[in-house]
Amino acid sequence: MEIKEYKDYKEAEILRLYTEVGWTAYTEDMTALRQGYEHSLLVLAAYENDELLGIIRVVGDGFTIVFVQDILVFPKKQRQGVGTALLQAVLDRYSDVRQIELTTDNTPKTVAFYKSLGFSAFEEIGCCGFIRC
């Protein structure tokens, strides 16, 4: 597996990935999704040969805060270390950043995954989060 910057946005590939993981709210406006990618701090992709396995997209300033906006792995490639490798690449790149945050589904599987990589729930550190949709 190779992790590299995802510089050439391929709409069909991104549409397939988001659709297969069930993130169809994003695919309702592909123009906005493309703009999100183009304005992200960093997008990394995991490849095996030339096959896309997954993507991680981060936003922020890269110095005081990084927010993991998207981490997606094709369902047939999940639980094979792809997500871990993508997230670890971000953690390594931004190791001096004070806050690396993300929001995710509150399921035992996702909570265990992020905790295994050193993340804490907001309430565990005396914080809470808010969102406006």
Image (cartoon, rainbow, N blue to C red):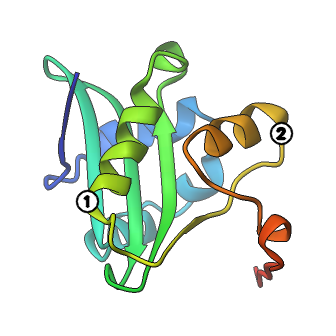
37 or 107: nearer the viewer? 107
Find residue 133 and report its image quarter.
bottom right
Q: How many marks?
A: 2
Q: Classify mark 2: helix, strand or loop.
A: loop
Neighbours of disc 2 within 10 Å: few (<14), some (14-19), many (20+): few
Q: CA distance from mark 1 to mark 2?
A: 27 Å
Q: Earlier in the sequence, mark 1 or mark 2?
A: 1
Residue 83 placed where, x, y %?
A: 46, 34
Residue 22 vs 30, above or below: the answer is above
Please give the name of the residue rendered at 36% of the width and 41% of the height, measured from the top-left corner: 86
**Mark identifier at residue 43:** none
Q: Classify mark 1: helix, strand or loop.
A: helix
Work out which quarter of the rendered image holds the N terminus and state it.
top left
Find residue 63 and report its image quarter.
bottom left
Horizontally, residue 88 falls left or right of residue 92, namely right
59 or 24: nearer the viewer? 59
Horizontally, residue 86 falls left or right of residue 100, namely left
Horizontally, residue 62 falls left or right of residue 104, namely left
99 or 82: nearer the viewer? 99
Residue 46 placed where, x, y %?
A: 28, 33
In this rendering, the label closer to the viewer, 1 or 2 = 1
Residue 114 placed where, x, y %?
A: 63, 44
Neighbours of disc 1 within 10 Å: few (<14), some (14-19), many (20+): few
Question: What amino acid is found at the position of numbered circle 2 in the picture?
Answer: Thr
Question: What amino acid is found at the position of numbered circle 1 in the picture?
Answer: Arg
Q: Which residue is mark 1?
A: 93
Q: Which residue is mark 2?
A: 107
Please give the name of the residue rendered at 22% of the width and 53% of the height, measured from the top-left corner: 9
